[in-house]
Image (spheres, helix red, strand yellow):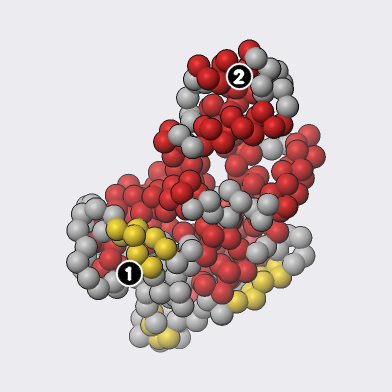
Amino acid sequence: LDGWEIAARLSYMLWNSMPDDALLDAAEAGELDDAAGIEAHARRLLADARAADPVQDFHSQWLRMDRYSNISKDPDLFPDFDAETPASMAAETREFFRSLILEQEATFADLMTSRSTFVDDRLARIYGLAGGFGDTLTAVEVDPATRAGFLTHPGFLAANAYFGESSPIHRGTFVQRQVLCTEIPDPPPGVDLQLPPADENIRTTRQRVEQHTSPDQCAPCHSMINAPGYAFENFDAMGTLRSVDNGEPVDTVASFTNPDGTSMSFTGAVDMIEQLATSDVAKRCYSTQWFRYASARAETSADTCTLDGLHEAMLAQDYDV
């Protein structure tokens, strides 16, 4: 690519807009013809407030946050949930990524495990935080034993749940597809997606999922999907911490095998997330997701060397975003 093309790549990736005069002048002067020049101008663009938009846009797409505006919950079960709650959930997660990446120079592990986040009065109730909170977001620290990073944000948990109950299948599918880049096909046509109702033998959501996905034709995918979903069973459909489900203790212990043959065993969400934070599979998936965003296309076999090089370069820098 010549300097003009590099300028366009940089600007549309880092600002979601056309190059400014300084970047066009740099292209004309040949300053974008080597890695040092590209880095210098990339850092200039990242230091500008306009860099916040692509950072938030990428993570919004990655987390499929377009669905947050459609979150709704059973008012009888979740009386604190109102029409403004989804907007608060989305605002928390957007500010989380902006602050950590552009102000705190976060690594991938920081995004996964940070106990810092931003809450207003609605979110503070979900988190169980005491104190005076208003309509604006306030920086807080959450319980490190129960929360870690964006995967325990109420927005993620509520968006990947049903109207009145949690959904290990939706949460587990997200982890596999978006965090580990595992190819999980959609259910085949005609499959009944409704879980069996609870009765005296199958009381918890986990037990109902296990029964529903036990047939042989379901097992190949659900052996990967269910386990990471079970890790989040300590959180209800709104993302509030819980210890019982339908009167029974929740069970968050699970394990699964990655496509590369490595296995993960964990006791709950925080344990799983901390392992994902150090996983080369998860790290490579994160850089691959950025490649897809920056290129506006899915990767092909021709991109393998590029992705290998990106992953190795990121590893050498502790996966500093």
Which residue in the protein does label 2 denote?
26
Query: Quarter-wise, where is residue 248 in the image?
Result: bottom left
The x, y position of residue 147, in whole percent, is 44, 70
Q: Nearer the viewer, residue 98 or 149?
A: 98
Q: CA distance from mark 1 to mark 2?
A: 48 Å
Residue occupying the point 71% across, 70% down: 263
Foreground disc of the pair 1, 2 = 2
**Is 312 placed above or below 280 here?**
above
Q: Nearer the viewer, residue 305 or 37?
A: 37
The x, y position of residue 149, in whole percent, is 48, 62
The x, y position of residue 258, in whole percent, is 70, 63
Q: Which badge, 1 or 2, comes first in the chain's sequence?
A: 2
Which residue in the protein does label 1 denote?
127
Residue occupying the point 74% across, 67% down: 262
Left or right relative to 187: residue 79: left
Query: Quarter-wise, where is residue 138 in the image?
Result: bottom left
Viewer can see residue 57: no
Disc 1 residue type (three-letter): Tyr
Q: Which mark is residue 290?
A: none
**Is 116 placed above or below 9 here?**
below
Secondary element under disc 2, as helix, strand or loop, is helix
**Neighbour class for label 1 at 10 Å: few (<14), some, many (≥20)?**
some
Secondary element under disc 1, as helix, strand or loop, is helix
Disc 2 residue type (three-letter): Ala
Residue occupying the point 58% across, 55% down: 107
Query: Quarter-wise, where is residue 302 in the image?
Result: top right
